[in-house]
Image (cartoon, rainbow, N blue to C red):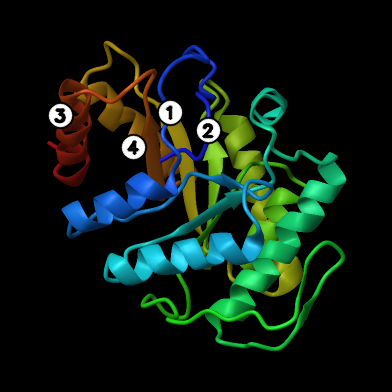
Amino acid sequence: MGDHLIQANPYDTAGDDMLEAYTPLGFLAARTERVRLGAMVTAVTFRPPSLLIKAVTSLDVLSGGRAWFGIGAGYNETEAQAMGLPLPPTKERFERLEETLRLARQMWAGVEAPFEGVHYRLEHPTNRPNSLCRPHPPIVVGGAGEKKTLRLVAAYADACNLFDIPGRGDLLRRKLDVLAGHCQAVGRPFGEIEKTISSRLEADETPTAVAERCAAFAELGIDHIVMIVDGAWTVEAVERVAAAAGLVAHPA
């Protein structure tokens, strides 16, 4: 689910309902058995890094190892001003993002040595109980910036999250090529990273059309599609996505 305090979907209105992410994720952990649980994605400025890492760890423990860690640099100035959230300059946000990723790796490794960064300093980072998912919950870095975001994906993440821009398959190919280059630079196999994309379910879109879109993404190298809708999900929309998933799994 998205992690915002006010509705950030540009197709909705700021007055629409919006739940803070980690409380309902904990609720879902108790009400489900198989679904993976995580935010898509949390802005690094929303919570102190140790608190965020502990929240994801707690979610992983309580769900039996089903959590993921979705994080990004953040961007929403309107939300930050409305809710009194910090939103430092872009350069600083990316510095904080990289330090948080480093700290997450350290805490999930069980290393309690002092952490020294430019923005974060922890005397004794402790993460007990540690995550059930080992070596750590899957790390998803959201965004498509070629110089910073995709470099951080290659260095620290298990998955990227790109954006569906209709009619721009060429741009998506470029982003994946850039990511492959960053992987090569750090000596990491490109195939280790799960390639995800966020794509919008249109109000009148049929399951067949959705399945065809999924097939097109797969040809471009995408492994996982995160489907979003305008407004709240309805039973009918979920059923359409489920039908499309069935067509993808069992094509005619």
From the image, tell me which residue sits under label 1.
Answer: 18
Assign the N terminus to one quadrant of the image.
top left
Q: CA distance from mark 1 to mark 2?
A: 6 Å
Residue type, numbered disc 4: Ala
Residue furthest out toward the front = 84
Q: Secondary structure at mark 2?
A: loop
Residue type, numbered disc 3: Glu
Residue at 74% in and 81% down? 123
Q: Secondary structure at mark 4?
A: helix
The answer to the question of whether label 4 and label 3 lie on touching residues, with beta carbons closer than 8 A, is no
Q: CA distance from mark 4 to mark 2?
A: 34 Å
Q: Which label belongs to residue 239?
A: 3
Residue type, numbered disc 1: Met
Q: Which label belongs to residue 225?
A: none
Q: Earlier in the sequence, mark 4 or mark 2?
A: 2
**Mark 2 burial class by Cα count in 10 Å: few <14, some 14-19, many 20+:** some
The answer to the question of whether label 3 and label 2 lie on touching residues, with beta carbons closer than 8 A, is no
Relative height, residue 96 to residue 113 (above, below): above
**Mark 3 burial class by Cα count in 10 Å: few <14, some 14-19, many 20+:** few
Q: CA distance from mark 1 to mark 4?
A: 32 Å
Q: Earlier in the sequence, mark 3 or mark 2?
A: 2
